[in-house]
């Protein structure tokens, strides 16, 4: 699927990895719909990028809201053939900490947004893609989900985040198998440490400390590098059912 032909929904598209993905799709001639709860940033980005980009205020865990936003995005772009799931949150809390056991409500919230939200958008977007006319390769759509290296190497205090991202990683192959008949590919990216809003308040010394275990290049990842991988996965028709790390070779201790 060529980048210029993409009509993509990007969740979490108002900032960080999602914003970089929206920008990359538009730069290559594709169209994008930003799904995000941050109306100020989302609307501003859509206004900046202009024609071909729309913003939709969406809670990815809300079935009716996602369905309505997909309808609106489809109308705005003249179709839908890609979904990129970047929406997510992270918290730091141990199974048992100084104040007692991990709060169950906070654990459920992380799972609900990161895992259930990803599945919700994927299933509803795929149902629409299944009605597309296939291209020369037989493709009707492509889905890229976002896990994390924490799915494989979760650290202290990451039990909720690692569980949610492990679930996203685990959905990859069964989703690809389920959607093969419809000509829809599913891949998942597992980013390492990236310069996202999570790290915006850190100075260069703190960032260097975080990046000290990255093999090369010894720095945090750039959102544009994540976005470039999204486009590669979209354009290469033989990439399917894959979990792809992008982390500079780091392995979390």
Image (cartoon, rainbow, N blue to C red):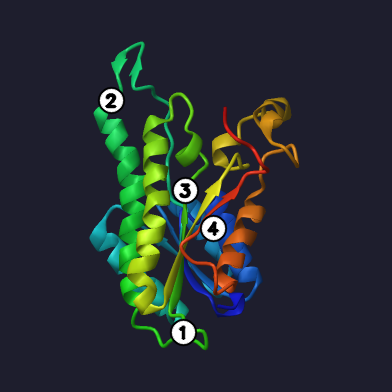
On the image, numbered disc 3 is attached to which residue? 147
For the residues labelled 1 and 3, the Cα–Cα distance comes to 27 Å
On the image, numbered disc 2 is attached to which residue? 103
Is the residue marked by circle 4 packed among few (<14), some (14-19), or many (20+) residues within 10 Å?
Answer: few
Residue 125 occupies quadrant = bottom left
Mark 3: secondary structure: loop
**Residue at left offset 42%, top offset 44%:** 165
Quarter of the figure that contains the C terminus: top right
Compared to 136, does 125 lie above or below? above
Is the residue marked by circle 3 packed among few (<14), some (14-19), or many (20+) residues within 10 Å?
Answer: many
Nearer-the-camera pick, 127 or 24: 127
Mark 1 touches mark 4? (CB < 8 Å): no
Which is more foreground, mark 2 or mark 4? 2
Mark 4: secondary structure: helix
Nearer-the-camera pick, 195 or 143: 143
On the image, numbered disc 4 is attached to which residue? 44
**Residue at left offset 32%, top offset 68%:** 178
Image coords of residue 173 (percent x, y): 40, 59
For the residues labelled 2 and 4, the Cα–Cα distance comes to 35 Å
Mark 1: secondary structure: loop
Compared to 155, does 96 lie above or below? above
Residue 95 occupies quadrant = top left
Marks 1 and 2, the one that precedes in the sequence: 2
On the image, numbered disc 1 is attached to which residue? 138
Is the residue marked by circle 1 packed among few (<14), some (14-19), or many (20+) residues within 10 Å?
Answer: some
């Amino acid at each position: 699927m060529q980048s210029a032909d993409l009509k993509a929904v990007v969740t979490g598209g108002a900032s960080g990895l999602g914003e970089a993905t929206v920008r990359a799709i538009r730069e290559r001639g594709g169209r994008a719909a930003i799904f995000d709860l941050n109306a100020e940033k989302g609307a501003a980005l859509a206004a900046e990028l202009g024609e071909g980009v729309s913003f939709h205020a969406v809670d990815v865990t809300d079935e009716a809201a996602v369905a309505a936003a997909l309808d609106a995005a489809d109308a705005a772009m003249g179709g839908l053939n890609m979904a990129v799931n970047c929406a997510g949150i992270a918290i730091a809390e141990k199974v048992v900490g100084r104040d007692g056991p991990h709060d169950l409500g906070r654990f459920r919230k992380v799972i609900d947004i990161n895992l259930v939200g990803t599945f919700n958008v994927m299933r509803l977007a795929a149902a629409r893609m299944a009605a597309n006319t296939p291209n020369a390769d037989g493709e009707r759509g492509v889905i890229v989900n976002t896990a994390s290296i924490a799915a494989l190497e979760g650290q202290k205090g990451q039990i909720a985040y690692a569980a949610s991202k492990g679930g996203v990683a685990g959905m990859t192959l069964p989703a690809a198998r389920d959607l093969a008949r419809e000509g829809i590919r599913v891949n998942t990216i597992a980013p390492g440490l990236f310069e996202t809003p999570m790290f915006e308040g850190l100075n260069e010394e703190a960032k260097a400390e975080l990046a000290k275990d990255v093999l090369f290049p010894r720095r945090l990842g750039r959102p544009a590098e994540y976005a470039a991988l999204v486009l590669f996965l979209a354009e290469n028709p033989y990439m399917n059912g894959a979990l792809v790390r992008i982390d500079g070779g780091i392995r979390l201790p």
